[in-house]
Image (cartoon, rainbow, N blue to C red):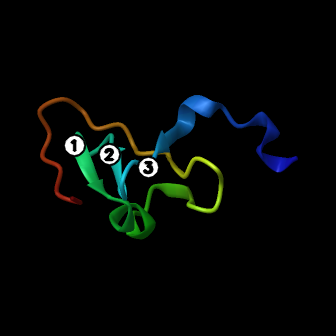
């Protein structure tokens, strides 16, 4: 019931233990998502495992020091 209003587009699906990271702009191990401060949900129990995150917007050309 609580996930009823979440957009499916917020989900990044896990494939072979890896997920596409919008901050790093590449695939990373799902364990890195679990430790990320922007991760909202890491669900590996569902039929299709997924990660939901809400990264802050990064201005173009800025250094990404948190990665």
Inter-mark Cα distance, 3 to 2 = 11 Å
**Labels 3, 2: front one:** 3
The residue drawn where x is 44% and y is 49% is 14
Q: Position of residue 29 (x, y in %)?
A: 30, 60
Q: Earlier in the sequence, mark 3 or mark 1?
A: 3
Is residue 61 toward the left or the right of residue 55 in the image? left
Q: Position of residue 17 (x, y in %)?
A: 37, 59
Q: Say few, some or many: other residues with alpha carbon within 10 Å of mark 2 (under 14 / 14 to 19 / 20 or more).
A: some
Label 3 secondary element: loop
- Who is closer to the viewer here, 58 or 6? 6
Is residue 9 toward the left or the right of residue 5 in the image? left
Q: What residue did someone put label 1 on? A: 26
Q: What residue did someone put label 3 on? A: 14
User: Which of the labelled discs sits on residue 21, or is there none?
Assistant: 2
- Who is closer to the viewer here, 23 or 16? 16
Is residue 52 toward the left or the right of residue 24 in the image? right
Inter-mark Cα distance, 1 to 2 = 6 Å
Quarter of the image containing the C terminus? bottom left
Q: Indicate the quadrant where residue 26 lies.
A: top left
User: Which of the labelled discs sits on residue 61, or is there none?
Assistant: none
Q: Are marks 1 and 2 in contact (CB under 8 Å)?
A: yes
């Amino acid at each position: 019931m609580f996930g009823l209003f979440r957009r499916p587009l917020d989900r990044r699906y896990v494939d072979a233990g890896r997920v596409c990271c919008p901050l790093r702009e590449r695939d990373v191990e799902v364990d890195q998502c679990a430790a990320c401060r922007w991760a909202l949900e890491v669900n590996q129990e569902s039929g299709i495992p997924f990660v939901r995150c809400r990264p802050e917007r990064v201005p173009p050309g800025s250094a990404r020091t948190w990665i």
